[in-house]
Amino acid sequence: MTAEIFISILPTALALVAMWVKLNGDLEKVKGRLYVLESERTEIKTLLKELQQGVEDIRLHMARQ
């Protein structure tokens, strides 16, 4: 009877382990993607600040003329 219980529980335990491994892999992918998106956001903010400064410089030059 103990062997029957073990045989019936083993597939469930293996499925749980497999699901845990898959979820951890998916979580790492999401973390990596989030890191990339955050770094791109920082880069975009920097570019927008540079663009704003350039527009202000153009306005100043046009106002002087």
Image (spheres, helix red, strand yellow):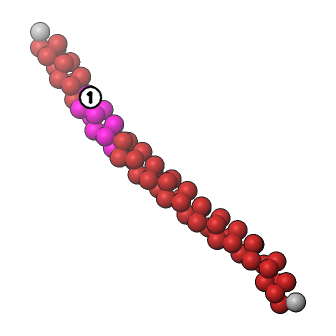
Q: Residue at x 31, y 40 (%)?
A: 43
Label 1 neighbourhood size at 10 Å, few (<14), some (14-19), many (20+)?
few
**Left or right of residue 24: residue 15:** right
Q: Residue at x 46, y 49 (%)?
A: 33
Quadrant of residue 37 within the rendered picture: top left
| Residue 50 on image: x %, y % | 23, 32
| Residue 34 on image: x %, y % | 45, 50
**Left or right of residue 49: residue 57:** left
**Left or right of residue 63: residue 49:** right
Query: Amino acid under label 1?
Result: Gln
Region of the chain picked out in magenta, as a range: 42-52
Quadrant of residue 46 within the rendered picture: top left
Magenta span: chief secondary structure = helix
Quadrant of residue 41 within the rendered picture: top left
Residue 50 included in the magenta stretch of the image? yes
Question: Where's the N terminus, which quadrant?
Answer: bottom right
Residue 47 included in the magenta stretch of the image? yes
Front in this rendered view, residue 22 or 53? 22
Which residue lies under the disc numbered 1?
A: 52
62 is higher (above) or lower (below) than 33: above
Question: Where's the C terminus, which quadrant?
Answer: top left
Residue extending furthest left?
Answer: 64
